[in-house]
Image (cartoon, rainbow, N blue to C red):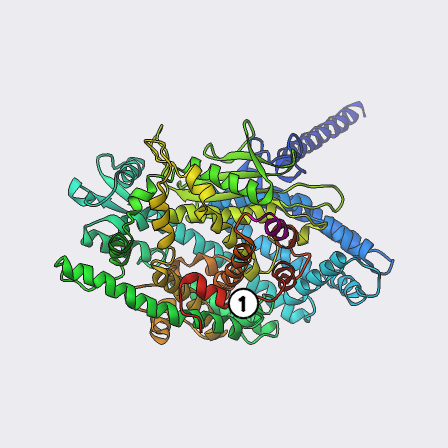
Amino acid sequence: MKRRTFLKNAIYLAALGEAFIMNMKQALATESLGPLLETWTGDHNGYPRFDLAKTVDLKAAMMKGMDLKRDEIKKIVSQSDKANFENTFVPLEDAGRPLNNSIRFFDIYTSTMNDKKMQAIETDMRPILAKFDDEIIQNDPLFQRIKSVYESRQSSGLTPEQQRLTEVYYKQFTRQGAGLDEKKKSRLREINERLATLFTKFSQNQLADEEDYTLDLDSEKDLEGLPESIKAAAASQAEAKSKKGKWCIANTRSAMEPFLTFSTRRDLREKGWRMWTSRGDNENAHNNISTISEILKLRAERAKILGFQTHAHWILDNNMAKTPDAAMELMLKVWKAAVNRVKEEVADMQAIADKEGAKIKIEPWDYRFYAEKVRNAKYDIDQNVVKEYLQLDKILEGMFDAADRVFGLQMKKIEGLPVVHPDVTVYAVLRNGKQIGMWYFDPYAREGKRSGAWMNEYRTQERFKNDVTPIVSNNSSFVKGKPGESTLISWDDANTLFHEFGHALHGLQSNVTYPSLAGTAVKRDFVEFPSQVNERWLMTNEVLKKYALHHKTGEPMPDELIKKIRKAKTFNSGFITVEYLASALYDMKIHLASTPDADINAGDFEKKTMSEVGCPTEIVMRHRPTQFGHIFSDDGYSAGYYVYIWADTMSADATEAFHEAGGLYDRKTCDRFRDTIFSVGNSVAPDVAFRNFRGRDVDTNALMRDRGFPVS
């Protein structure tokens, strides 16, 4: 008996030990997830703990976050009380905060530090996240509560912002199929999960072609025409690629466009252009043609299930434009004038080529090169000379100064906060001495970082339960200068810097109650409007005279050069507009043509579309299909690339309002712009917000005037 008792006790103690060890492991695992899930605390109203967060824990953190949100949703729908705003929308706005925090980290790493390990996590998690989104949308008891509050919103004493929130939620749920039968819901889940996989595949294929291909230059002869800054960057790129002693032009816009502008080697320009425009369209494992075809079929099927004629009709139903016809009408109005301008630009370029005895016909790889020659001849502007005055750190100061003059914001650099990469700097954003947010700046290109420029929201503003200040970032792909030397950027880069900072200012100056209505969470064809207006302050004397300083002498940009830049404001507007609109027209047309059964070849459709619209042969789409991440890496800008031109009609009209009032720094107009546009988020319908600023609906002819096109 004693022996049996001893054995029982031993087995019991061993079991206790195993349970203790398991509990300890679970506790440690949960503890390691904390930085990815917990509300951010500490100085500056809290900040993300990149020093404690581990990417290896991202998947577990998001899975945990989903479980926590499931529990929160269960509590909402299990209530016996009749649905009202307080017991449904209030807890719904509060639900999912740990999940949201983990997804913020996930998005930051997948866009800026997307190495092979991170790509594997992304491949696993995108479909799971898509499936979870559908799980929430298709929760019928939840939808019925939302619908009940929505239907009584005008008679239940809700504030205008609360009414707006109910409308936004109801529209979101119905647009995603919340009211469908189970068979259709099931198919939607399958489609969205598969699309998430395809979007990730598309993005990773594009990134692979950007990182795996470079234009290698072997000798000094290959460098002919290139300024010293491009040579130095190419040498650094070669060294990073273990090709020391050579020069490499990276397969990204920030590296290739300057090469195409200045290289006198036409053979190398063509080689580089073909490499750059063939991203995602090479005969390798990263070809995106079949991926695009499947994306189009699934989008078309989803639209049919949701009750829409095409994917384009589904997208536009929730935008300011409302219908594809309205978007097409604006694009074609501008297209005709832009194509006519291109004919003039090409004639000017061809004349120079003929005069030089080049014996060529202008081709796409010649456009930037000869446009620069025309710029020199017509306006006596050399972009290399302009670039000498555009030091990144100084233009940054000028951008901050403009934000202070226009919006009363001060940017104060913060040292010591953890960041995702050493290149990132952090700023406190102040107004009247009070911190209203933080801004993270990630300026340089690197392996694993997507190309281009964008704004990212780390934390959304709200004053729902507590006063939460926003945290946003701007991310660019500038070519970093040598150690100890200034990073020089082009005029286009400086313009993009101001544009993306406009998005940041939109997020930072948000002043609404509910996070779902805050900052840039507005209709897609409105979100580009504030940022496009922000570009306008770059060309003011207040910025150029004080901050456009020569990188060697420190002398300000001469008045004569500033006058030339302004005089040339609409130079090359034909190329810029056609290059963009070719992509926007393609985007709309391919989504109008897509059906659940049609296998559309993206490349063949490109040729057909460019022929139909009469695209000049000297220009190709700004984003050829296989690298068109705006529309194929997620649903974001799909059937919506037109939004830049739509928003620019408002931008041009709003800018005229400033000039009518006396200038871009007119105090009353600046304050009205902040209060009616930048601070209201989606708490006010966008057409109403614009009328509150301008006093009327938009005048589309303002865009034609702004671009130097004839007004019809």
Q: Quadrant of the C terminus?
A: bottom left
Farthest residue toward the front? 662
Name the spot of residue 613 as percent of width and height, x first: 37, 74
Name the spot of residue 566 as percent of width and height, x first: 38, 52
14 sits to left or right of 107? right
At label 1, which amino acid type do we have? Asp
Q: Is residue 71 visible?
A: no
Name the spot of residue 424 as percent of width and height, x first: 48, 35
Residue tagged 1: 699
Asked if the magenta segment contains residue 296, the reply would be: no
Closest to the observer: 59 or 581? 581
Which image quadrant is residue 76 in? bottom right
Which image quadrant is residue 24 in? top right
**Residue drawn 27% across and 58% down?**
367
**Residue drawn 52% across and 51% down?**
663
Q: Quadrant of the N terminus?
A: top right
Which structural element holds mark 1? loop
- Classified by dominant secondary structure, the portion drawn in magenta counts as helix
Closest to the observer: 457 or 581? 581
Asked if the magenta segment contains residue 669, the reply would be: yes
Residue range (magenta)? 666-672
**Residue drawn 33% across and 39% down?**
388
Closest to the observer: 184 or 296? 296
Give above or below for 488 relative to 684.
above
Closest to the observer: 72 or 357? 357
Count neighbours of disc 1 (C-alpha within 10 A) and say few if under 14, some if 14 to 19, many if 20 or more.
Answer: few
160 sits to left or right of 359? right
Give above or below for 326 relative to 139.
below
Name the spot of residue 497 as percent of width and height, x first: 46, 45
